[in-house]
Amino acid sequence: MTRRTAFFFDELCFWHSAGMHALTLPVGGWVQPPAAAGFAESPETKRRLKNLLDVSGLSQSLLQQSAPAADEADLLRVHPQAYLQRFKALSDAGGGELGPQAPVGPGSYEIAKRSAGLAIAAVDAVLRGEADNAYSLSRPPGHHCLADQAMGFCFLANIPIAIEAAKARHGLGKVAVIDWDVHHGNGTQSIYETRSDVLTISLHQEHCYPPGYSGAEDCGQAAGEGFNLNIPLPAGSGHDAYLQAMRQIVLPALERFAPELIVVACGYDANAVDPLARMLLHSDSFRAMTALLREAAERHCAGRLVLVHEGGYSEAYVPFCGLAAIEELVGVRTAVQDPMLGFIQSQQPGAAHGRFLAEYVEALAGRLR
């Protein structure tokens, strides 16, 4: 079955530069800054995903569009004025370190607002019924950003900004955020940890980022207790462990919560060749996880599902993972063959490690219940 999938992207989002070279070289304005040498968060993973959508022909099946930048009212529902002023001032001055692992370049404030605006528009398109589901190719990402603190390449909390805009404009009630980026979704968790109207679930590599963090003990606070779930998986976890975690923990949690909208913090850095993590997923892993959440959205919220792009740092492999997820959203398979699929499948955990991971996930599921 073919579905109406809206795809939001903007060329400006590829122009965010995190490199300190931007402080000294005469780039910016009407010239795209070069990517920072050796810096993981590059525009190329996203640009190559968009290019693969085009050359594969999948773009022809998408409702492609850009969107306005998030306005100040949108931002202020999540971020305090003082933080926004500090971000804008640093961006206007040419760039610098806004937070831990969060360098900005000239114009990054305006680009981050556009990135958040794409997420707002993706949610809006689904809630208005203009699309069955949607994908926002947001950059810079957002899931590490706290209300008043940038970190981990993230400067604005794209998904909370989009959710709060939808609550203000559409009266949206319960929302589930599933974060399968390999790094913990600490920003989204912190913003919603005392609320019961947003269920946040993070599947991530244990102790990876923030450094040393597991999160299994965190389950929300006050009114939000029980509405935050963390699924820290050991390094080396592959396809079966993630699918088991989805089926034993994520899907039952969605069943209990009955959301009106499901949003995915869609990072691809759990892939087997990512330079910033040590997991073993492949393109069909992201296809399968997207299918499970698409089916859950059809059961619980009339199919309303939005994927917002987060991390993923392999320029050669992220495009295949993203293509697989978007093919599943649309219900179309292109002729593209993942050249790494067979190799990564052959590198999945052996029987002994597989049994350990299965027992680990089962024990974690029991504890979270």
Image: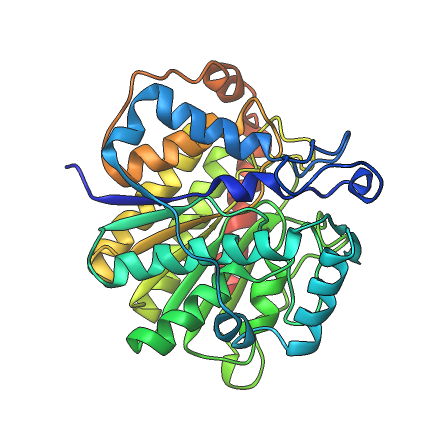
Residue displayed at 43% across by 53% down = 118
Viewer-closest of 13 and 162: 13
Marker count (numbered): 0
Left or right, residue 207 beside residue 368: right
Of residues 333 and 79, the one nearer the viewer is 79
Percent x, y of residue 341? 46, 19
How is the rendered protein coloured?
Answer: rainbow
Which residue of the protein is positioned furthest toward the left in this rendering? 1
Residue drawn where x is 72% and y is 55% of the image: 210
Compare residues 139 and 276 and report the one nearer the observer: 139
The residue sitting at 60% across, 40% down in the picture is 15
Residue 130 occupies which quadrant of the picture? bottom left
Which quadrant holds residue 61? top left
- Which residue in the rendered view is the most extreme toward the bottom? 222
Residue 190, how many percent across, how many down? 61, 70
Counting from the top left corner in percent of width and height, residue 100 is at 79, 56
Locate residue 219: give its quadrant.
bottom right
Q: In this view of the protein, can residue 249 be seen by the observer?
A: no
Q: Is residue 254 above or below residue 227?
A: above
Question: Image height check: is 165 above or below 132?
Answer: below
Instruction: Quarter of the image for the N terminus: give it.
Output: top left
Residue 279's place in the image compared with 254, above or below, is above
Instruction: Report if residue 290 is visible in the image.
Output: yes
Q: Residue furthest right?
A: 24
State whether residue 98 is above or below residue 361: below
Residue 180 rendering spot, x and y as whole percentages: 51, 48
| Residue drawn at 37 percent across, 75 percent down | 167
Judged left or right of residue 52, residue 314 is right
